[in-house]
Image: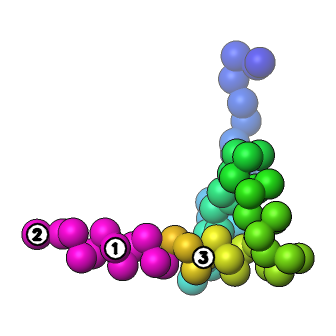
Amino acid sequence: MKDEYDFSKAEQGKFYRPGEELKIPVYLDEDVISYLRARTGGADLSALINQILRKEIELLKVLEP
């Protein structure tokens, strides 16, 4: 690593895109993926996982005080 870096020609915000949505990857354990794949019959895993999480969120909302 250099002691100093020259940022005199840098452009602030060059890659900033207002309104862009950040999609964060989610990594599942292999046993979870295997279980879900075995029960989907080739269906979209992403859609199934979203459906499972939505149901879980609804359960948590019921338990909130």
Q: Nearer the viewer, residue 60 or 1?
A: 60
In the picture as drawn, the residue positioned furthest to the left comes out as: 65
Model colouring: rainbow
Residue 8 to residue 3: above or below: below
Residue type, mark 1 in image? Leu
Instruction: For marks 1 and 2, give the one nearer the viewer.
Output: 1
Which image quadrant is residue 33 in? bottom right
Q: CA distance from mark 3 to mark 1?
A: 14 Å
Which image quadrant is residue 62 in? bottom left
For disc 2, the marked residue is 65
For disc 1, the marked residue is 59
First of labels 3, 1 by sequence position: 3
Residue 25 to residue 8: above or below: below
Instruction: For marks 3 and 1, give the one nearer the viewer.
Output: 1
Judge left or right: residue 17 versus residue 36: left
Q: Secondary structure at mark 1?
A: helix
Residue 47, position as x, y percentages in the image: 69, 80
Which image quadrant is residue 36 in? bottom right
**What stretch of residues is rendered in magenta?**
54-65
Q: Residue 50: which disc?
A: 3
Residue 60, position as x, y percentages in the image: 31, 69
Q: Secondary structure at mark 2?
A: loop
Is residue 7 located in the magenta-colored stretch of the structure?
Answer: no
Residue type, mark 2 in image? Pro
Magenta portion: prevailing SS class: helix
Residue 29 to residue 6: above or below: below
